[in-house]
Image (cartoon, coloured by chain):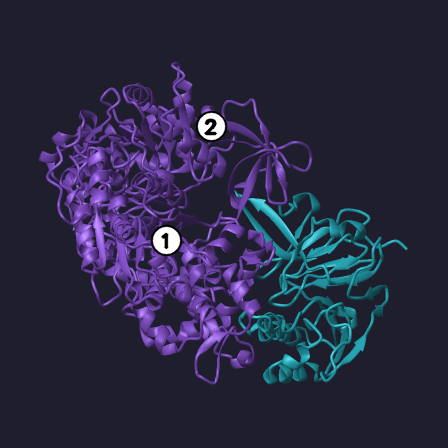
Amino acid sequence: MERPAPPLRPTLPSPFQDWFASKGWAARDHQIAMVQRAQAGRHVLLIAPTGGGKTLAGFLPSLIELSQTPASERPEGIHTLYISPLKALAVDVARNLMAPIEEMGLPIRVESRTGDTNLSKRQRQKANPPDILLTTPEQLALFCAWDGARAYFANLKTVIIDEVHALHGSKRGDLLCLGLARLQSFAPAMRRVGLSATVEDPDRLRRWIAPRPEVADLVLGTPGAPPRIEVLLSDQRVPWAGHSAQHAMAEVYETLKTARTALVFVNTRWQSEFAFQELWRLNEDNLPIALHHGALAPEQRRKVEAAMARGELRAVVCTSTLDLGIDWGAVDLVIQLAAPKGSSRLVQRIGRSNHRLDEPSRALLVPANRFEMLECQAALEAVAAGALDGDPPRTGALDVLAQHLMGACCGEPLSSEALFAEARSAAPYEDMSQQDFDDALSFVSNGGYALRTYDQFHRIVTGQDGLWRVRNPQTAQRHRLNVGAIVAGATLNIRVSSGRHGGGRKIGEAEEWYFEQLTPGDTFLFGGEVWRFEGVSGMDARVTRSADKEPKIPSWGGTKFSMSSHLAERVRDMIMDRDHWQQLPGDVQDWLGAQATHSAIPAADQLLVETFPRGGKHYLVCYPFEGRLAHTTLAMLLTRRLDRLGIAPLGFVCNDYVLCIWAMKPMDGLDLDALFQQDMLGDDLEAWLDESVMLKRMFRHCALISGLIERRFTGAEKSGRQVTFSSDLIYDVLRKHQPDHLLLRCARADAAVGMLDIRRLGDFLQRIVGKVRGISLPKVSPFAVPVMMEIGREAIAGAAQEAILEAAAFDLISEALS
Amino acid sequence: MTAPTNPPVRLPCGSVRLRVNGEAVTLRPSGALWLEQHQTLVVADLHLEKGSAYAARGQMLPPYDTAETLRRLTQEVTALGPGRLILLGDSLHDGQAEARLASTDVDQIDRLARGLELLWVIGNHDADGPRHLPGQTMDEIHINPLILRHEPLPAPQPGEVAGHLHPCAKVTGKGRSVRRRCFATDGQRLILPAFGAYAGGLNLRDDAFNPLFAKPPIAAALGKDQVHLIGWSQLVADR
């Protein structure tokens, strides 16, 4: 039901008023506000929930302005540039924008341009630019490296950036922000418009959108009705351990039947394959249930999306690939299988359902184990309180800056002063030091090496005017082939084998490393079917259909999120607060009670460390609740220390809540304050990092983004292995001869943030100083059971092993509760 | 001519001693070949100045590869004190590489050449050999019962010691794979790994190796401090 239209306000010209009226709509307040800010020439950030007419609000000022000047009187060139992180979104917005333009008969030409746009269309767009161009951040980077860019964008009035919340905290966001700074210098009067979902800290995005030191105005859309979220309890029981939520599939299926269309979100690709298979096993009604994840072939994903848009599907099991994207009106239920990991992500996912603001969205959380039950409850309370996760602070990456500087110098001659000032007007780089900038510029020019043997070779050179420019057109061309801040791991096409040398139908793609661990004959699950791996030829992994019901190789990588700090804090508070326990199901309350009896319930700011013997080994289990990444780093560093203490650690396992280390010798007598002392983040970390393969992988990414090594040569793409191999050789030599080189600094910084969660670990170690509580137990505690059950699980496959596991689990549980 | 069939021996220094065409040879973890009876050290495919060759085309690889390669070579010379050092071709990455050498690296080569006989076997990258650097340029070298040349000839060649192909061994285990430079031998002939810091590698399972061996070769892969012998059946192809 739409609200009755209030009297139309004078700011909209009559064709627009008539158009809204013809639809039975009224322009919303935030749409009017966007028009007013445009008239005042302000940069603006619009924060509105999905379904609030956000995209139209973004474009409305441009449509009005364009409709008021006849095409013949407009200056040549693009009027409005729209940038979206998703190619599909650019195409979809084009379609949605055409409706009002055609219905009002406006003389406005809209075109899209993505990596898929063919050459002739690109050339036409260059010669004869549309009024509105819809594109991606990578295309903007390419524009910046054109030699005609300044003239082409001279009359640009507005740039609209969609899904800012998803872009700003990444290298892709860094590159985009630098690109915006470039555009601003082409068209100083250009207005920036950001569109975002609800975020914890809008001011940060207001700074990100504006050329610094300015701050964009904030326009808020009307919030939608609060969502209705429930936690699914299967027979009022929550399993001790596991991540698949297999126990609840029958109820999930029954719930699907009550919805018109449901999105079933999971956290990893493997979970999506598993849930899809389980749901189809139960699917007696033959409901049209589809699967969507990043490894499926793009055509297949497009097919699912199209069927969804036509309203033909009842459910889609999906990963974060559908966190963003096209609005599907028909979705009226969102199911989150396994814990949501963060309240912002949960809100975003719930927002994918029910795009009518006046009705609440419906969501169902399905915890897969007891700690996840706590997390789901915490998430539910966080969403009810409107509390979102904060984003960690971010400074712009220098490998990205290097790529941008190269691109800028491919576009036109520039002074280093102008480049520095322009880069500092991009929010991620506003505090960048002159030294860091100089290092990046010297890297772009001649590699930035202390040994000056390359002074005769440069990628960019200064002329007599003192301006930097690309050395020759070939170098510029090579740069343009390699723009972008997305580095995908090398992937192989998965093809149905039609003979010895492939060539069959492509069913998807997957990371090269996945196939490295398979031998021909192994079976695995993909796209909801079991396949037999036959071998690899060229860039293809050849597979055939398998009659097996259970795949031999179960594990499947994919994005795995760490629980956010904000949720972690809520979970810790919940555990400590006995009154809060009543919100939880009976068996979880019993479990918490048993922990209090057999071991202890830690205070909220305390770290509980349990030690106990079991099966001839000695265990140390602690409960930081800081997420898998920080726990893994902590476990690595603790085992180094324990090794030095002669404890002979044998292994460790971590999840989002707990970490467990086992060793030959007992750990009860240890000085825990010393063991958890903050100085482990100094030398121990350095020493460990230097040995780790991870840093090599990070270095490879930085080397690709910065242009030290190239992804593409004219006509040919290097396979992942070729790139990996040569970047490893470079890494070894550079580390020995210039350990403080820009790219090594970049790689270490990336590892600290992306792989190690050093900041969070540091905060944790500081928080627990003097608050480590050690308890020496005769046997495993109730809290320790879930993580103990994960030991060895990853190596175990198939249904028969599942039985062994369950038997072992039963032993553990009875031991903990006796 | 029948070669004695003594099994390979791992030496305390991490090297492996085995016989090629009847001659005892030592495979060093560095990738160098040590012919003790002849006091001769052999290394292949140094590719000196490969980094600057890329830089000249606009790809600014770190310029430390020559220094790094010479540092490792100097380590071997210091450890073994050979009377003769053979560089088995592709020692210089291209025809202009010599001119691009840093003066410190030229000095290092001069120091290396002092007190030993330095022989440059020519390869396809450095067909002319060096112009100013010390040492003598050769097409191939006979050290009975071995013959040393850069590029292996097709079909089995008993006694041939060559480089050129940059062999690498790949093995998998525990869900991971490891790929290392290696020597390759069937007891009749020997292919040396590339010694240069920036030299890439070709998987020993690649078809290019097929015509060389009468029976499947074994790989002697370069570990951190020791050489690991790996049988043909343990080796996996890259894809």
Tell me the kind of residue under disc 2: Gly
Residue A477 image-quadrant placement: bottom right
- According to the colouring, which chain is purple? A
Residue located beneath label 2 in the image: A528
Closer to the camera, A44 or B64? A44
The residue positioned farthest toward the right in the image shown: B1
Mark carried by residue A444: none
Question: Where does the image place residue B81, in percent across and percent down from the top left?
Answer: 69, 76
Is B49 on the left-hand or right-hand side of A672?
right
Is there one chain holding both mark 2 and mark 1?
yes
Question: Where does the image place residue A474, in percent across and percent down from the top left?
Answer: 57, 67
**Up-down relation of residue A447 to residue A155 (above or below):** below
Structural crowding at the residue carrying mark 2, measured as other residues with C-alpha within 10 Å and reported as few (<14), some (14–19) or many (≥20): some
Closer to the camera, A450 or A202? A202
Residue at image position (69%, 67%) is: B45
> Is residue A575 in view?
no
Residue located beneath label 1 in the image: A131
**Up-down relation of residue B121 to residue A357 (above or below):** below
- According to the colouring, which chain is cyan? B
Quarter that holds the C terminus of chain A: top left
Residue A265 image-quadrant placement: top left
Sequence-wise first label, 2 or 1 = 1
Q: CA distance from mark 2 to mark 1?
A: 44 Å
Question: Where does the image place residue A238, in percent across and percent down from the top left?
Answer: 26, 27
Residue at image position (34%, 23%) is: A249
Identify the chain of the residue marked 2, using the numbered disc in the image: A
Question: Where does the image place residue B221, in percent across and percent down from the top left?
Answer: 64, 56
